Image (spheres, rainbow, N blue to C red):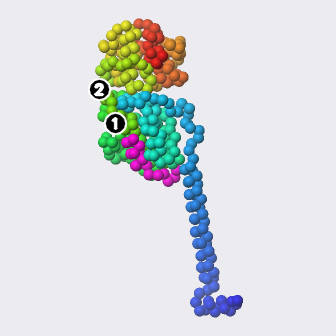
Amino acid sequence: MATPNDYRAIARKTDRPMWIWAGCALTSVLLLLGVVVFVSITLLNRDDDIGAEAKLPEPWPSKPEKALRPVSMPTGEMVAALTSETSAQVLCQAIPAQRWEEILGGSTLLEAGRACHAVTAQLDVSAQMIPALPEDTSRGLPTKTTIAGKLAVIATDKDGTSLSVELVEVAPHNGASPVLLVSVRGRIVRPPETESKAKALAEALIAGAMPPGPKLPEIGEDGEIAPQQAEAGPLKDKPLPVMSWLLCGELGRALGVPADKAKPTFFASCELNGVTADYSELSTAVVPTTTIAGLPAQVDGRGVFVQLTGDPAGQTLKFKGPGDLQALAEKMVPPLLGR
């Protein structure tokens, strides 16, 4: 066993005091301990991330009214002429659930509100139709590109990607929503690559929601479109110009006059013989004064307003002009609701 004299001899030979040797040994121990702690924390954080990735939100859909429901799929350019809730339903169902999962890389939950909303363990995604390509985004100035041969702009940062694709060339003020907006962002600290997923999803949705079919009707400066015959049926989920043609047909039948002189607009409205009927997805809240076709309705000096859903500020049919509008509404509302 070494004695104090031995340590003094070592110190003399190396010309170094004993406290330096002790300090070196302590430093080595502390460095080794630091490495162990760092590795342990890294492994724990990785475990936490994996645990977070494995969780999907519950309950789902986030609200009962956002559940997917059967919906007629548009053709041609008509996806640009749907109401926001209908277009959200269409986009969610334009491709099979399995395709959503292939593109996004895992189990996918879907719901439809004002936009189609998709969630995986790692990603939060939305797809919706908007009036025009954005000039800027929350992720900064977008870069021009092409998707499925169509003009698009894209912006990506560390949190995700925003991609807008112009499906149909129409002026924004004309009432159509011709631009598909896809947003892909991460739900975790280190999300997977988002730009390629946004592009792949946009291409799939365009193919699914725009099979061969009719073009949008030419839209005038005041929103007017040419009259066209449409087979009688409910308004629900129809493109806006088709709703207008349906309103024109029912106006003609209710008034007992030919509908060929009717004046439809792109905005789900029609005027014939001074009487106007129009549909609104969202409107001023109805304050019921009576019922029409069994639905709450407000009749006042402005006209007749029929509440189509349980939400007083939701979907309505409005009638204004000369004559007995209440009797007119009683004739028109049932076929327009598919009764």
Could you say which quadrant of the image residue 265 lies in?
top left
Of helix, strand and loop, which one carries label 2? Answer: loop
* Highlighted range, magenta: 188-204
Could you say which quadrant of the image residue 222 lies in?
top left
User: In the picture provided, is 107 more to the left or to the right than 200?
Assistant: right
Crowding at label 2, few (<14), some or many (≥20) Cα neighbours within 10 Å?
few
Residue at the spot 62% in from the left edge and 74% down from the top edge: 29
Label 2, on which residue? 218
Which quadrant of the rendered structure holds the N terminus? bottom right
Residue 262 lies in the magenta stretch: no
Percent x, y of residue 310: 54, 22
Residue 27 position (above or below residue 80): below
Can residue 132 be seen here? The reply is no
Label 1, on which residue? 167
Percent x, y of residue 274: 35, 11
Question: Which sits in the foreground, 211 or 235?
Answer: 211
Percent x, y of residue 279: 42, 21
Crowding at label 1, few (<14), some or many (≥20) Cα neighbours within 10 Å?
many
Residue 92 position (above or below residue 258): below
Can residue 22 be seen here? The reply is yes
User: In the picture provided, is 162 more to the left or to the right than 144?
Assistant: right
Percent x, y of residue 278: 41, 19
Q: Distance between the residues labelled 2 and 1?
A: 16 Å
